Image: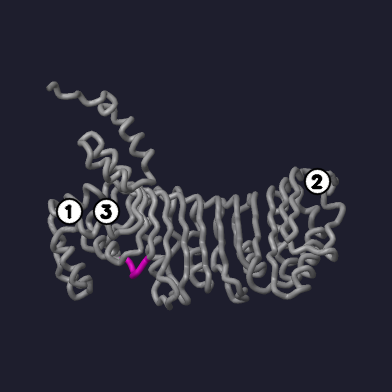
Amino acid sequence: MAQLASPHALYISEILFAISYHLEDDRKALACLARCCHAFSEPALSVLWSSVRSFSPFIPLLPPTVKFLWDHSQFDEVSLVDFQCPPEEEWRVFDSYARRVRRLYSGSRCHQIVARIRSQTTLFPLLRSLSLQLIEPLDMQGHLFADSLRSLKISGPAYVHCKDDRVQMAIAHVARDAPLVEYLHVEDYTYSVAQSFLPPLHFVHLRTVKISSFFNYTLLQSLCHILSQAPVTQLELELPPLPNKEWNISTLVFPVLKSLRICGNPTSAEQFVSHLTSKGLQELSIHHTRGPASAADYRQLLSRIADKYGNTLQQLSLSLGQLPTPNYPYDLSQAVLDAFYAIAPHFNQLKTLHLSLPHNRYVHLAPELTFESPTWPSLKLLDFQSI
């Protein structure tokens, strides 16, 4: 019987990759496809390993001596101090899979220790997106961040008292090893963080930064300092719910910022805006959903914004969430509106205005707050939402 020839489509690698990407969400099918024939093996494995949600799948691929340490819980300083990195040929299987990874989510101590053991080599050389929880401080000799990295989400240990500056030092590693990174998201769930004494770091391509500081201002203040000279154009800050009158940024920050979103109280928002060196902020969003605030706080914030960016701001969004006291949010809503009416003429470039405020029959939206009014020569869109 004549042997059937393989379909011609199986000789076209682009078709094989297209079929594999079509099964991207079906990992079981991809694994079967990788084993069904030699032609499908490479494209199916590349898609299957392109996005990995933990470091765990790589543990069985480690060299025997490294895996022995992990299996016997010997990843400690005493065991590691004299441990010699296995030769490159023992990393061959690990590398054959690691080079396929483009997105990695890792909160494993094993990942950090293996990077320390193999300090002369980047574990995932073609990685483009990394989400990393720092279980312990980084080793200065290790290379955890590939030079191909474009996007990084990083966090410290959750809900503990952290007495070191591991997050700041990790970002220093990024500046050293991943010069092409464009997006950085830092989440802080710790109760206390050591102040870092790092100088402003050199980033060339960093454009978008998000900082979520849930409990205190220490890390936020430190990050603002070390990122102060980065060419960031889009910034989002999530502040602790309670204002801190003593919170201060020692240097002027973010000279080319175009878009700013602040989730937090108006007092801290005003303190931050006052330290911006950007001359051309175009988009600003203030979302206050937790913590106390007064009418005076909002008057001071709006006045600061008008004085500093009245000639450049094109889009403004103010959002005040529902607060538990029955009448308080409506009184504050009216105070915010009154304060805004007083300085509205200063925003002579404003094209889009979004207001989201607690509203009842005692909160009055003034009739002149419309885009037909000469008060708003450039306004194109007015969006008022009552909550």
Q: Disc 1 on helix, strand or loop? A: helix
Image check: 224 left or right of 380? left
Q: Which residue is mark 1?
A: 91
Q: What residue appears at the point 35 percent right and 49 percent down from the top-left corner?
A: 51
CA gap between label 3 and label 1 equals 12 Å
Q: Say whether marks 1 and 2 touch (CB < 8 Å).
A: no
Q: Nearer the viewer, residue 291 or 222?
A: 291
How many numbered tags mark residues here?
3
User: Relative to 78, does residue 115 appear above or below in the rendering?
Assistant: above
From the image, tell me which residue sits under label 3: 122
Residues under numbered marks 2 and 3 in contact, where contact means CB atoms less than 8 Å apart: no
- Residue 365: say if magenta: no
Marks 1/2: CA–CA distance: 65 Å
Q: Is residue 82 visible?
A: yes
Which stretch did the figure color magenta? 134-138
Residue occupied by mark 2 = 371
| Residue 126 shows up from this direction | no
Find residue 353 and report its horizontal and vertical position in percent: 73, 51
Question: Few, some or many C-alpha atoms within 10 Å of disc 3 (few <14, some 14-19, many ≥20)?
Answer: some
- Image quarter hosting the C terminus: bottom right
